[in-house]
Amino acid sequence: MKVIICCFLLDIGCIAPLFAQNNLGTRLLGMGNSGVAIDDVWSVKANAANITYLQSTEASINYGKYAISNELSNQAFVLAFPISSFHFGLHLEQIGITNFNEQKIGIVSAKKFGKNISIGLGFNLHQINATNYGNARGYSLDIGLSYKINSKNTIGISIQNPSKSEYQLTNINSKITSSFNIGYCYKNTDKVTLTTSINKVFKQNTDVRIGLEYRIFSIMSLRGGMSVNPYKQYFGIGVNHSKIKYDLAFSNENNLGYSPQISLGYAF
């Protein structure tokens, strides 16, 4: 079974890097994977500029399974912390099976310019390990911009791998994802957060995503969302107890079924 999955991933142009690029954490997954304008510790991956709105050091770890196979999983860790007038972040991620997996390591830096504008930059190391195919390594840059119109409205822009960097010295048919993402977040009250984004991956169709978070109790939130291309449905739940955050989310694609993801976070 593992060999079949490995060959499948390779034959379709290596779907694994696409999964890895789209892992924005369990909270954002439950909101339609639309997080380019939301301030969250997983902004380290979604849009580094937004980590400037975090008030303290935060860390989170998540684990996800994919409906295509119980053997295919994704693990990730993110950390965001302030130092003086800058904010920094780190993310580590792995997706795949024993015979085929991708690792991604990234560091980000972000800074506010005035009260409304933040800019973030990220540097990533990508590596693919494929049994009988060899290994591949590559590097990429990310750029993020956040404009907080006021306390309720935020616009975010994220560009991943704008230089279209590729894996080096490899016979594996895979490329590092290049994408442009623009999004909007509206917070009506402390109870309601609405987010939407337009996501364009190079040489793929444009995707539109929307998400909603509603805090039903002081420590519990319900989430839902959808994406257009491919059409997916998302829902999730989050519990914040003291400084600990628990999140559970599911994505559903008609041809693949449900894929769960869970995370545990801590605000220091």
Image (cartoon, rainbow, N blue to C red):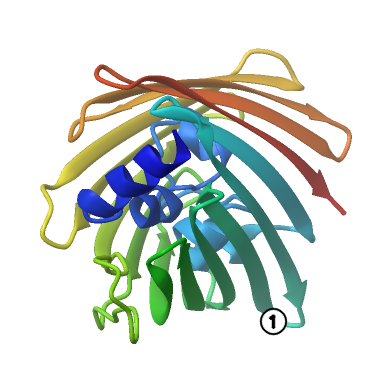
Q: Tell me if residue 118 can be seen.
A: no
Residue 211 at x, y percent in the picture: 39, 30
Is residue 23 positioned above or below 189 on the image? Answer: below
| 3 to the left or right of 192 | left
Task: Say which of 215 and 224 sits in front.
Answer: 224
What is the quadrant of the C terminus in the image? bottom right
Outermost residue toward the top in this view: 216
Q: Is residue 236 visible?
A: yes
Q: Position of residue 209 (x, y in %)?
A: 28, 36
Q: x, y (%) of residue 148?
A: 45, 58
- Residue positioned 76% across, 43% down in the render: 265
Snapshot quadrant of residue 147: bottom left
Quarter location, residue 128? bottom left
Residue annotated with mark 1: 85
Rendered residue at 66%/29% (across/down): 247
- Residue furthest to the bottom in view is 169
The residue at 47%/72% (across/down) is 126
Residue 217 image point, x, y percent: 71, 14
Q: In front: 265, or 64?
A: 64
Query: Which residue shows up at 76% across the image and 55% down it?
Result: 58
Q: Can you say which quadrant of the picture contains the N terminus?
A: top left
